[in-house]
Every structure is written in C-alpha cells, then in structure tokens.
Image (cartoon, rainbow, N blue to C red):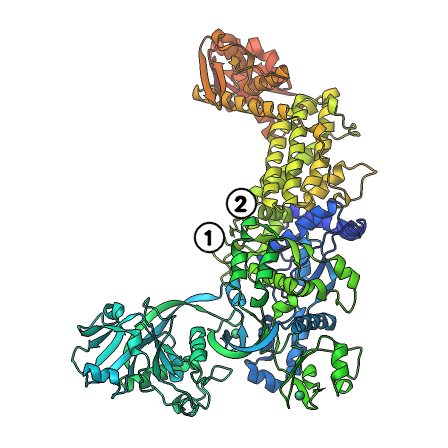
C-alpha cells in the first residue's frame, strides 16, 4: 500500500463516485460536526480511541477498526447520544525509533549517542506525523467520522505530564519498584521488550539451531566416585540450545527425584551421567554399557565439576560455583535431564541463582557483545556469531559429546526482527501481584463482545500477569520521572512540571522558555535536583513503556488533573472501545490495569474484540509478499459501504479471523448495496408526484407483510446493535433486503405500471420502507443510507440521515400472523414449483388446480398470491383432481393436478409465443408498449390454425400492431409448441 492514495489511474466505479459525492455533501454541510453538536452534553456516549502508531500506513486491520469505531458511535448518535470522537496518535517508542535509525543511517545505541540524542529525538518528532495525510484519506473514504484536526498526541508536553502524574500516583501507592529480572531483551535495540509486545503480532518463529551436548568433567577424588570405584574420567552430560551461554555457566541442575544412570562409553575409556529415561535418545548411535541406573538427582547434589571456562570474576566473587544442584524445573522431556545454568540468561536459572546465591556475572554488554570478563577469544564478538568459536573451542578440548539440529519456536524483536535473548537486567516495574484480586474482580463489570473472552482469554491474561515492566532503555518516549541521588542513592518521583521546577536547581537554565518545555530527552537529563541529604540527584536514563502512555489516554488526552477536571470525570469510564484480539493482552489489559490501580474502577464498560483479516488463503497479509488485494482497489470497485457491510457482517466481528475474499465482497455488493440501489432506481422511475402519507389501513396483505418484516428487522437490528453484535444486525438487514426485492417488489411490479389507487398504495409503501430502511442501515452503510434518505425525505426532515433519530419500534406495524402466513405462502409456492419441475411442467404452462390448506385469515389474498406465483387457475380439494401429484414438507401439504387438456395446452402455447416475442423486443431495445408488426412462418397446418385462432390474444399480450404470416422467412427465431414449430421475425 505504499502508493496507496486514491488518485491513481484506477478505474473508479459508479458506486465509488456516488460515495465520494456523499463525502463532499457531508463535509460541505458539516454533518459530522452537527451530528455531535445537536445532542446534549448531559447525554454522552463516551468512545475511547486506541491511538494507532503514526509511523505506518493504514491497512485492512485499520479499516476493520475504523469501521468498528464508526458503526457504534453512529448508532448511538442516532439514539440521541452525544458521541465526541477525537483522534489520537501514539507517537513514541521503538517503531518510530527504528525508522529514525534508518533515516539517519545509523544502527544501535552507540551510534545514536554519537550522533546525539537531541538530533535523534528531533528527527523522530519530525517524522512522527509523516503519514497523517494517507491516514486521513483512508479514514475519510471509508466513511469513518472522527475529529482529525484536534487530535491528541502522546508526545505533547501536556500528555507527558499527565503520564507523570499517574506514575506519581502509583509511586505514592508504593506500586512502583526497581528490580532485576529476567526479561526478553533485544540486543540490537538494547532494551527489554515485553512478552505482550512479542506475543501480540506473533513474533515467535520456528528456527533450527545446532544444539550441543556438553561434557562437564566431575572433579576426581569426591566421595561419590570413590564409592563407585571408577577410576576413569566421569562426565555429566548437559544439553543446550544456546551454546553462547556456556562461558557463563556456573552450575548444573538435576531433578532431585529423577533417576540418573552411569554409562560406560563404547571404547570403555570414560563414563557419562544422564537421566536413565533418556539413555536411548542420547546414545542412539552408540552401544553403551549401563553401569548403574539407580542414582537419583539427590545423590549427585553438591558434586563439583571442572568449569568449561575459568572466568576470573566468578572465581573472585567469593561465591561457590561449578557444582551440581537440584532444581524443580528440571525434566526429562528432552536433552539429558541435566540443565546447564548461567544464572543471568534464563528465568529459571536466575531464580535458582538467587536462591543458591550463585555468582551473577554478565558476560555480554548491552549490545550483545562479549565483555572484558569473558574469555579472551570471545571479547567484543557478537554473541550469536561467537557460537561457532565456542563450539570449536570446546570440540578441540574434547568437551562436546554430540551436536544436533533442533527446530523450536523462538521469540524475535517485534520491531527490528533480531532474535531476542533472555537477560537478567535491572528494570522498573508496576506491582500487579499486590492488587491482582481487585483487577480480576473489576473485570466482572466489563461487558465483553464476544462474551466468552471475559472468563476465557482475558481472565487467563489477568491470572498469569507478571509485574509490568515499564522501563525501556531507549530515547524517544516519555522519560521516567525518577531521580536518583548520587550521594545517598535515594529515589524521588516527580508528578508534574511544577514539582520538578521547585526541586530543581537549574530548571531555568535547561528551560529558558517556560512556555515551551520539552520533557523529552536529552533536556530532562540535564536537570539537577537537590536531595534531602544535600546530594545531587539526576534522572535515571530509562524511558517509559509506550503502553503506559496509550493506556493513559482517558485522562492524559485532557491533561488531567492539571486541566479539564470535570470533563475527564464526566467521561470516565468510557462506554465503548473496540480493537483486535491481540489488544486483550496489550491495550485492553493495560487500560484495565491503570483504571483498577489508579481509580479503583473499570476504564471501559463495553469492549468489542475483533479478529484479524487474513488473505484469501488464510495467511497473514504481508506487504512485502503482496499476497492480498489493495484495499483502495476494493473500495474503488465496490465502494466503502460494501466493504463495511462485508466486514461488519463477518466472523471477524466475533473475534474470529476472516479470510478476506474478493468474491464474497462482490457478492455483498450485489446482494446488499446494488440491490438497494436498484430498488431506489425503480422508485425514482415511478415517483412522479408526491408520495401519499403513509396509512396502514389502506395496505394490501403483501404491503402489510413487508411493513411487518421491516418492523421485525428494526427490532432485531436495535437489539443487536445495543448488544454490539454487528454480525446479527447485518444478517437481519440482508434478509430483509432480499425479501423486499425478490418478494415484495417482484410481486408489486405490475401494480406500478397502471396509474391508480393500487399504484399509489404501492408507491406509498415503498417510500415508507425506503425511508425507514435508510435509518436502519445508516450506522453500517452510511453512504447508501444517505442516498436513499435524500430521495425519500420530506422538506421538514433533517438535512442528513445521520442527523435523524433512530426509528422507534411500533407494535402497531407488526403483524406476526401475516408474516407467518406469508412464510407459508412462500413454502407452498416452493413446493408447487418443485412438483412442476418433477413433472416437467414449465411455469409458463398454466395448470388447472392446486390443493393446499385454507388460511385462517385473509385466505383469498394469500390464495391469490399462490395461484399467480404458480400459474394455476384455482384451488380445489385434492379429491377433485384428475391426476394429482402431492408433496409434504414441514407439515405443509401441496398437490397439483398435472392433467393438461387442450385448453390449458393452448394457453401454454400462447404464453410461449408471447414470451419469445417479449424476449426479442427487449433484446432489440424496443420500449415497453411500442407497437410493431411481427411476421411468422409455420411448419404445419395445425400450427396455422392455432395462429389464426390466437393472433388477437398474442397481439394484445405483447403490444403488437399486427402479426402476419409470411412463408418467405428464411431466418428468424424459432419455438416449438404442442401444435408444431413457428418462426418469427420483425
Ligand atoms: Zn530490536
Ligand atoms: Zn541523597
């Protein structure tokens, strides 16, 4: 979608042109603004917009969320609510930082700092809003109404200050702490990344690594070996998928209750210790002798081994290292049943290290290169590239037992795609555990759509949530307002600019223009604060996790609590949010956490969770693979309404994935948008004078039926949209449109052709239906709704359908008995047609009689419809039929008399000829009613007699001047009927 603006050479369809005209109408008449302004402030429906990153172009995912975020606010507006919709931009964080690095032609923190944080952040600021135009274009074209100009941005000073405020609130509640934890870490971006970020867009990939089984030599002379009287070397075998961690090894872990065996090598020169269960797996290619398989891990506990590398810093730490210990996390699922432990580079390892007080010696620097404490041959090498050297070195020393290719799922940086490592680093956290019960309790107050997420996925996320790591070792984000005293080491948190100004001794030097305070790095880092002890305090270098910013939007967009106190309070919690499923562990989760911890309340009352739009084959849409149709092409071809209806009516709105299919989109266009448009065209053809005021009592049974169906549709759509179920609403609308077009309108066509009372009633009914329908479809398909409305509205009506009120349901218009009977009529007709088909009787061939049960109400009306639909002369009891053919379905019994006498055959033949002439008339472009002369040639005498007998009837039924025999016809259109063949020409 790189060149995705809509001005290219694409062919623009008519529907698309019409929609663009409607957009201009809305803009010129400020319909969106008016739709908000006319609703009272006291009756708000609060919508929170999850701010998108401004750094990329909009794609199907954004179209999906845009339509979701448009539909429900439009609906609530029509229900009388005031729905302010303000756009927001997520401006900070790794996505933009990665782009800045590219733009400046640099990579990594070292180069950023060489270039200067000021230049880096200035560049970021200048690039953040680069794609605003494309966003605006797409959002507007799709029909989403949102206040774009007055958007809030997470990089604004006001916004940042509100984020500081919330941190101070949490700080005061003692919910913020610094700690060393094992986190997923990107060595290229040199920052921890959260599990949520990595899982969100599934940044796990299957990779194949060469794993190794390492031989750790047990030091001789220990009791255990002496008892076994083994004099040859004994090795413990340990398996690792990350050989780069081996130089940092400080211990081996075994399972206390797991059984281990001592195995003699094939040549008998050495012995190995592995879990008994895994012997076959480990020694698959080698015949070995089992010396003993009765040991447990506990027996091995405390045994010392020779280190692979004698790291001085470990030796000098004064802590015990390089021994076997027991640990609960050891299993015999894979490997050797022995886990090599490097303390720093794994969560289990780190916790074990803490409990045993193992030395913690990092061998990598922050960019993933081996540091000065690492063995000489590794220093300054990138960890991943050094793996080869490590393996070679160990191989040379005879310490590798085997190597093996191994495929496993591995996390990658969601931003720069580098493989992540687990790394114990110092970071800042919000304590989640302390209030977890309350967080879970408050979830009960949220209305989830779909419902099952509440006690399914979301509850699981809450249950297993770790403390929230809020620090990032980066540059372009809200700086954490924590200052550390250089003298006493005490921390202080600042919750406002004012507080900081008061405590700082150089505020006016750093910020000479107080009206223009940029809280970003590097300026903020220059501030000095005086500690109570008299020492100087400076800000810690970390910036904030962007999810703290985006989840602060309910208050930070208003610069609360510094401004707009009432405004925020009247708009909290929000009534509605809607995003895709991955936000359950991101924005939804973080919003809920902030709401729970800071306000002891929910942040949002209703949440719509969508799935993901995949390509036709069910694959992830990928810009580089170009494996999906350009959304602009789709809009240009089928219009935004069709796309909206297709998406809103699909499983994606129930949090399932949708495989986007152009064929289905086209079908939606045909069945919904184009059908409506054709009905409207029909209305316009006959709409010569004012439509009569709607009067229910004058309606025919057919009209009462469709009016009642519309009422049922209104009730259904109202309930569905109240319930945030757009799928149900769409289904209901689609069924109605089909009914309107293929039943009511098709059966009413003849009524429109002759001026008179019946035409007036049909016209009145259609006008009434189109107007009401325009309201019902307005939230989902705002364009065609406007088009319909503009053609049927009267002078006193609001200017736009989107300024109108949602129709009230009216029981007086509902007639369930008519609806039920009409469904029965349709069923009888369907059965009648299938009986005809089974007996090879064309619909054009009139039949004498049909049998069905009498209707309890309005029998004649229903009977009339059935006879006309089936082309049958009368209803009789089945006992009166000559050759009855009968069928039953759903307790409805239908029989037709298939006996054809001469009279019926002749009638059928006349119809056949009339149809042929009508068909030719249409194909040659003649107007209805235009008189012509038709010539014919017959093949037999009986055919000639037939034509003489029926020429008058044929002329009448097909608007002919005359029909004359002409034996000289060579070409012509031929038809066979029971009296012979006939050719016609005109
Ligand atoms: Zn990265
Ligand atoms: Zn101090």
Q: Quadrant of the N terminus?
A: bottom right
Residue at 66% in and 48% down: 16
Observer able to see residue 97: no
Ligand 2, by image quadrant, is: bottom right
> Is residue 439 depicted above or below 878 in this figure?
below
Residue at 68% in and 43% down: 784
Q: Secondary structure at mark 2?
A: helix
Residue holding disc 1: 617
User: Do the numbered discs 2 and 1 sit on residues whose CB atoms are within 8 Å?
Assistant: no
Residue at 77% in and 45% down: 803
Callout 1: few (<14), some (14-19), or many (20+) C-alpha neighbours within 10 Å?
few
Q: Quadrant of residue 385?
A: bottom left
Q: Quadrant of residue 702?
A: top right
Left or right: where 536 falls relative to 272: right
Residue holding disc 2: 664
- Residue placed most toward the observer, 438 or 804: 438
Q: Quadrant of residue 516?
A: bottom right
User: If you read the primary sequence from the N terminus, does the residue marked by circle 2 or circle 1 appear first?
Assistant: 1
Q: CA distance from mark 2 to mark 1?
A: 14 Å
């Amino acid at each position: 979608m790189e060149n995705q603006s809509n001005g290219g050479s694409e062919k623009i369809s008519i529907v698309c042109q019409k929609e663009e005209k409607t957009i201009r109408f809305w803009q010129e008449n400020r319909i969106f603004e008016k739709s908000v302004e006319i609703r009272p402030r006291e009756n708000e429906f609060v919508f929170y917009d999850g701010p998108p990153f401004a750094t990329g172009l909009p794609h199907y995912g954004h179209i999906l969320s845009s339509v979701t975020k448009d539909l429900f606010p439009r609906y609530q507006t029509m229900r009388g609510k005031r729905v302010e919709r303000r756009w927001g931009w997520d401006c900070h964080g790794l996505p933009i930082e990665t782009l800045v690095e590219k733009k400046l032609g640099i990579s990594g923190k070292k180069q950023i700092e060489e270039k200067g944080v000021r230049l880096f952040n200035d560049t970021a600021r200048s690039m953040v809003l680069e794609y605003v135009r494309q966003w605006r274009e797409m959002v507007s074209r799709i029909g989403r109404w949102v206040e774009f100009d007055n958007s809030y941005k997470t990089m604004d000073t006001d916004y940042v200050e509100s984020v500081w405020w919330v941190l101070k609130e949490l700080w005061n509640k003692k919910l913020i702490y610094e700690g060393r934890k094992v986190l997923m870490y990107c060595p290229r971006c040199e920052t921890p990344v959260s599990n949520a970020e990595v899982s969100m867009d599934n940044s796990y990939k299957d990779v194949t690594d060469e794993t190794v089984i390492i031989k750790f030599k047990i030091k001789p002379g220990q009791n255990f070996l002496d008892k076994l009287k083994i004099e040859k070397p004994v090795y413990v075998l340990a398996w690792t998928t990350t050989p780069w961690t081996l130089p940092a090894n400080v211990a081996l872990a075994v399972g206390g209750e797991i059984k281990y065996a001592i195995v003699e090598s094939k040549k008998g020169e050495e012995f190995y210790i592995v879990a008994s269960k895994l012997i076959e797996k480990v020694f698959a290619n080698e015949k070995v002798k089992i010396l003993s398989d009765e040991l447990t891990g506990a027996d091995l506990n405390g045994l010392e081994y020779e280190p692979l590398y004698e790291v001085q810093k470990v030796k000098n730490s004064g802590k015990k290292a390089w021994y076997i210990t027991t640990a609960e996390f050891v299993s015999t699922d894979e490997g050797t049943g022995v886990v090599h432990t490097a303390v720093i580079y794994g969560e289990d390892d780190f916790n074990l290290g803490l409990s045993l007080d193992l030395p913690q010696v990092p061998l990598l620097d922050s960019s993933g290169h081996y540091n000065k404490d690492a063995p000489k041959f590794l220093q300054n090498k990138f960890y991943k590239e050094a793996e080869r050297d490590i393996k070679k070195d160990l191989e040379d020393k005879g310490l590798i037992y085997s190597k093996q290719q191994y495929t496993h799922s591995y996390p990658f940086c969601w931003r720069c795609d580098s493989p992540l490592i687990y790394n114990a680093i110092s970071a800042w956290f919000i304590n989640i555990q302390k209030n977890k019960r309350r967080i879970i309790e408050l979830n009960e107050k949220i209305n989830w759509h779909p419902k099952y997420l509440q006690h399914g996925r979301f509850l699981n996320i809450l249950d297993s949530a770790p403390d929230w790591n809020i620090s990032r070792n980066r540059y372009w984000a809200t700086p954490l307002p924590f200052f550390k005293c250089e003298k006493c080491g005490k921390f202080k948190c600042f919750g406002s600019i004012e507080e900081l100004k008061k405590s700082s001794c150089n505020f006016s030097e750093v910020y000479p223009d107080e009206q223009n305070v940029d809280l970003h790095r590097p300026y903020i880092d220059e501030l000095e604060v005086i500690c109570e002890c008299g020492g100087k305090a400076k800000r810690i270098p970390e910036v904030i996790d962007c999810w703290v910013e985006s989840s602060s939007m309910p208050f930070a967009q208003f610069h609360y609590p510094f401004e707009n106190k009432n405004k925020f309070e009247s708009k909290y919690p929000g009534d509605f949010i809607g995003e895709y499923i991955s936000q359950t562990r991101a924005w939804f989760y973080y919003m809920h956490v902030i709401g729970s911890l800071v306000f002891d309340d929910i942040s949002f009352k209703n949440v719509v969770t969508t799935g993901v739009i995949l390509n036709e084959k069910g694959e992830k849409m990928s810009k580089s693979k170009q494996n999906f149709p350009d959304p602009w092409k789709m809009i240009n071809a089928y219009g935004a309404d069709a796309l909206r209806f297709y998406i809103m009516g699909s499983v994606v709105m129930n949090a399932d994935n949708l495989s986007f299919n152009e064929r289905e989109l086209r079908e939606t266009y045909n069945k919904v948008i184009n059908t409506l448009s054709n009905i409207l065209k029909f209305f316009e053809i006959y709409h010569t004078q004012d439509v009569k005021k709607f009067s229910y009592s004058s309606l025919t049974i057919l009209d009462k039926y469709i009016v009642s169906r519309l009422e049922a549709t209104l009730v259904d759509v109202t309930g569905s949209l109240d319930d945030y179920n757009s799928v149900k609403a769409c289904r209901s609308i689609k069924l109605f449109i089909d009914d309107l077009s293929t039943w009511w309108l098709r059966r009413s066509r003849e009524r429109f052709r002759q001026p008179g009372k019946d035409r007036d009633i049909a016209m009145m009914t259609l006008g009434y239906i189109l107007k009401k329908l325009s309201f019902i479809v307005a939230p989902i398909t705002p364009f065609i709704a406007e088009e319909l409305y503009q053609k049927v509205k009267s002078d006193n009506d609001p200017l736009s359908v989107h300024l109108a009120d949602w129709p009230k349901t009216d029981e007086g218009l509902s007639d369930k008995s008519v609806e039920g009977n009409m469904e029965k009529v349709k069923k009888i007709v369907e059965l009648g047609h299938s009986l005809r088909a089974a007996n090879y009787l064309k619909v054009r061939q009139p039949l004498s009689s049909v049998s069905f049960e009498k209707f309890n109400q309005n029998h004649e009306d229903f009977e009339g419809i059935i006879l006309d639909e089936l082309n049958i002369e009368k209803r009789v009891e089945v006992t009166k039929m000559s050759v009855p053919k009968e069928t039953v379905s759903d307790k409805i019994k239908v029989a037709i008399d298939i006996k054809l006498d001469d009279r019926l055959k002749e009638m059928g033949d006349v119809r056949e000829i009339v149809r042929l002439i009508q068909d030719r008339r249409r194909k040659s472009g003649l107007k209805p009613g235009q008189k012509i002369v038709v010539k014919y040639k017959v093949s037999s005498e009986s055919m000639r007699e037939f034509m003489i007998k029926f020429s008058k009837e044929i002329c009448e039924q097909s608007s002919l001047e005359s029909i004359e025999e002409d034996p000289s016809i060579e070409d012509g259109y031929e038809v066979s009927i029971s009296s012979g063949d006939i050719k016609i020409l005109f």
